[in-house]
Amino acid sequence: MLNIFNRESITSAKALVIISVVLGHILEAILMSDGEHKILNGLYQSIYLVHMPFYFLLSGWLFKGAQPTVKYFVKKIKHLLIPYFTWLIIFNSKAIAGFFANLIQGNLAGEKALFYKNHFLTQLYGGMEVHGFEMILWFPMCLFFTQQLANFIMVKVNKNLIILVVVLAYILAFVNQYVFPEFHLPLALNIVCGALPLFFIGFFIKKYSLKSYQVWILVVLCLLTSVIFFVGNFPLTYHMRSAQYGMPVISAFAALGGFYIVLFVGNYISQNKRTFKVLQYVGKSSMTIMYLHALILIELYALNINNIYLLLIIGVLIPTLIHLIMARVNWLSKLFLGENKLPHN
């Protein structure tokens, strides 16, 4: 079973998942304007069941175990926080330029000063407070804090109590979902409660290796859940940005089944050299695609481009090309790509 976790299959799987992220946002825009597309809705819900949980499961699977907290913190600052704040500055370059222009001209007072203050505070708050092409900014920060908390738990918490801590986090995630649905913390910190169990599931399935029949049970559960989505709207899918984690236990297991499905497909694709040669660029560019695809889609919509296939191709292709260009320039690689390395844990 572990052969599906080789480097090539993981790279292919990451390509498939980031493509599904772009497709999910394209479908979301269609369904917001016309929610009567039952097939598209089923596909949309199936995508959301798997794509974001996949990243946290994979991050846990790649996690090497307890590491010195300061060293691990600095390592992840380079890989996640520096690119995050670099992209944040780029996304706010117009507002930053306007702020300094008004400051130099002495026009920064009253409502204008209040506007810039609220704008920059909102950007720093992140999470659910940012929208549009910045909506994906919740993910890198949530991933960073999930990794840090997981490592801290592994270092500081007694091994016999780790499962108890993870279960408590999972319970808190559903308290957030069902009891306090409007509760959101800065930088998507509340979502860490929903992401942490996925991270540890990924870690433990690597450490203890599920048996083949157990994996196939999870795969069947995921497929059955997807069939349900095509029949009607059922609250089983993940919408992690808004702290929606589906149905307790069932959705987590279905997402885990989807994780294996993606890896199976990724492993199959990686064996075809021509296909893998193309997809590996997409897989390695996944974080750049994550940051840029929504901005590109919005610009395409402004040009009245609404064809799903064209939106998907351009939404994936342009960020991939940008990633490949930045990867060739050392300082761009460090600022935007986290030193141009695949995420290691």
Image (cartoon, helix red, strand yellow):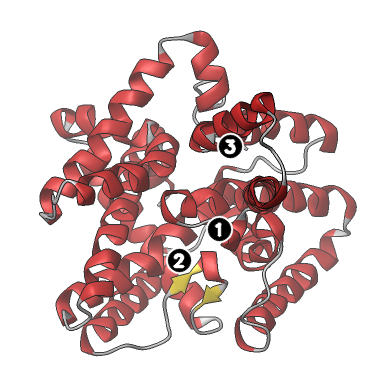
- Measured as percent of width and height from the top left, residue 61 is found at 56, 49
C-alpha distance separating marks 1 and 2:
10 Å
Q: Callout 2: few (<14), some (14-19), or many (20+) C-alpha neighbours within 10 Å? A: many
Residue indicated by mark 1: 205
Label 3: which secondary element:
helix
Q: Secondary structure at mark 1?
A: helix
Left/right placement of residue 153 relative to residue 308 reads right
Between the C-alphas of marks 2 and 3, the distance is: 27 Å
Classify residue 327 as left or right of residue 139: left
User: Is there a contact, CB below 8 Å, between mark 2 and mark 3?
Assistant: no
| Nearest-to-viewer mark from 3 and 1 | 3
Assess disc 1: are there few (<14), some (14-19) or many (≥20) residues with their C-alpha within 10 Å of its C-alpha: some
Q: Look at 30% across and 67% down and name the residue there.
A: 28
Q: N-terminal of the two: label 2 or label 3?
A: 3
2 or 3: mark nearer the eye: 3
The label on residue 256 is 2
Above or below, comparing residue 25 to residue 280 in the picture: below
